[in-house]
Amino acid sequence: MTIESIITGIIQLIISIALAVLSLYIGFGIIGNIGKIDEEEEISRGNVAVGILVASIFISISLVVQSGVAGVSVGLKNALAGDLYPLIAGILQLILGVILAVAAIYLALNVFDKLTKEIDEFKEIEKGNVAVAIELAGVIITVGLIIQSGVLGITSSLF
């Protein structure tokens, strides 16, 4: 183990922590914009359904960020060797992945809402309907898994 690999590992850890915090921030903001739910108030009241929905968004975005961090890690190793292109490509790929994940979650929830005209999912979740929250959580996590595969595909083609 060389000092270079230790420094690379520490930098990767710092990047991962920063991305985790950013993911939580983005994930927490999404639910308010999608469903017009004040998630902070609902969670403080003990609304389990809102907690499930927010957790699923965190999981979905973290799946995409996790696959993007792999590209940044490879890019970082190459940057330390003098080639900045892989690092720039890895960062751009990660940003694109997060944007696609957020957009895909938003789109999937809107399409699902149109398909289920008899139920206003977000009103049900606001009322604490856990069954509806689990259903939407399944949609959200599925979208995250699919986007993760796409981001991994981009990573493998870039490096």
Image (spheres, rainbow, N blue to C red):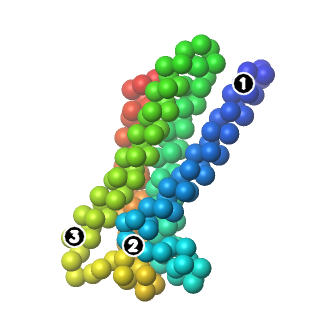
Location of residue 133 by image quarter: bottom left
Give the mark, 3 or 1, whose residue is nearer the N terminus. Answer: 1
Q: Residues within 10 Å of mark 2 (few under 14, many from 20)?
A: few
Asked if residue 41 can be seen in this view, the reply is yes
Q: Residue at x 56, y 50 (%)?
A: 22
The N terminus, quarter of image:
top right
Q: Earlier in the sequence, mark 2 or mark 1?
A: 1
The answer to whether 125 is drawn above or below residue 53 in the figure is below
Q: CA distance from mark 3 to mark 1?
A: 51 Å
- Image coordinates for residue 97, horizontal then vertical, percent: 42, 42
- The secondary structure type at the circle numbered 3 is helix
Image location (x, y in percent) of residue 158: 42, 25
Residue 12 figure quarter: top right
Identified at 53% across, 52% down, the residue is: 23
Q: Which residue is mark 3?
A: 114
Label 3: few (<14), some (14–19) or many (≥20) C-alpha neighbours in 10 Å:
few
Q: Give, as a three-letter code, the residue at label 3.
A: Lys
Residue at x 36%, y 82% (from the top left corner): 123
Q: Earlier in the sequence, mark 3 or mark 2?
A: 2
Q: Which residue is mark 2?
A: 36
Query: Tag 1: residue type?
Result: Ser
- Secondary structure under the numbered disc 1 in the rendered image: helix
Q: Which residue is mark 1?
A: 5
In front here: 115 or 126? 126
**Vertical comparison of 7 with 121: above or below:** above
Say which amino acid is labelled 2: Lys
Q: Which mark is in front, 3 or 1?
A: 3
